[in-house]
Image: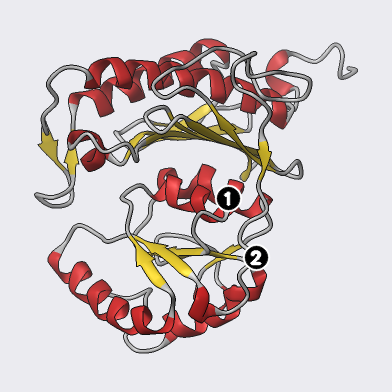
Amino acid sequence: MSTVDAPPSTLRPAPAALLDLGLDVAREAGTLLVTGRAGTVAAEATKSSPTDVVTALDRASEALVARRLREARPDDGLLGEEGSDTAGTSGVRWIVDPLDGTVNFLYRLPNWAVSIAAELDGEIVAGVVHAPAMGVTYTAVRGGGAFRWETPVGTDRGGGLGAGASPGPTAGEPTKLTGSAVTELGGALVATGFGYTERRRTTQAAVLTRVVPRVRDIRRMGAASLDLCAAAAGIVDAYYERGLHPWDHAAGALIAAEAGLRVGGLDGREAGEDLVIAAPPSLFADLTALLAEHPRADTD
């Protein structure tokens, strides 16, 4: 049977098409969240600790994303922060954080985003991090570079950003991301984040006291996907954090890598829950060496 005659579920989708779908869905979820945030929002429950909160809008956003992706591609898998976990049969799995930066969202701080990544046969091939309260959207396709699109704050439009597509007449041209040009760790602005348990935070504070004197400064902005995108854009020079789940870093790590950053863990390991580090090649070795000192940044 030829490729033309193959059933849709057996066709290998183009990463750009997956990005277009992910972007459309992220924008719709962003509109839901912007609209919902205009009212009263409160923490509805906690997860790993009393400081790890979830709102009704986290769940509503994930339900919308799951429904829209299922309508468009019913055979795909889905892994979401708020409990979605289906295997699928197409070779595509969507990895979704429906509201990254929930505490920022609760406090009306703008650093929150919808993060959607498409994984094809076990490899992340497309990612979008959409931050409507900041007026920015970050996108990447594996092998196609990473981009930052600026949009009016709090707005969302349809239209994909894949091959031959346009974000719309008011979005302007995207900025291709190339990371930071800083080459010395002492001159680097480094972003990080903290876990939710007392034990983890205690160790992270000890690591931080070692890092701070040896870099330009530290920033803690509260949304891992946006931290990775900030590193990709050169807004910060590097980023590290322990305890991230796949939905926290899948899209952002692809965007960082496509911007030319090295993304990994300590001792040559891949980025994962133990530790995610993203830095330009000129900073990566020195930063990983610093984070490997005692107490190591990948332990509690």
Residue drawn at point x = 23 percent, y = 22 percent: 37
> Which element type, helix, strand or loop, lies under badge 2?
loop
The residue nearer to you, when weighing 61 against 280, is 280
- Up the image or down, 33 lies above or below 54; here it is above
- Up the image or down, 229 lies above or below 86; here it is below
Q: Residues within 10 Å of mark 2 (few under 14, many from 20)?
A: few
Q: Residues within 10 Å of mark 1 (few under 14, many from 20)?
A: many
Q: From the top left corner, tell me how far across and down residue 63 is, in percent.
A: 34, 19
The quadrant of the image that shows the N terminus is top right
The residue singled out by tag 1 in the image is 233
| Image quadrant in which you'd find residue 82 | top left
The residue singled out by tag 2 in the image is 181
Residue drawn at point x = 21 percent, y = 42 percent: 103
- Kind of residue sitting beneath label 2: Ala
- Up the image or down, 231 lies above or below 119; here it is below
**Is 133 positioned to the left or the right of 89 in the image?**
left
| Image quadrant in which you'd find residue 162 | top right
Q: From the top left corner, tell me how far across and down residue 17 is, in percent.
A: 69, 23
- Kind of residue sitting beneath label 1: Ala
Q: From the top left corner, tell me how far across and down residue 209 is, in percent.
A: 28, 81
Image colouring: secondary structure
**Is residue 91 visible from the viewing direction of this image?**
yes
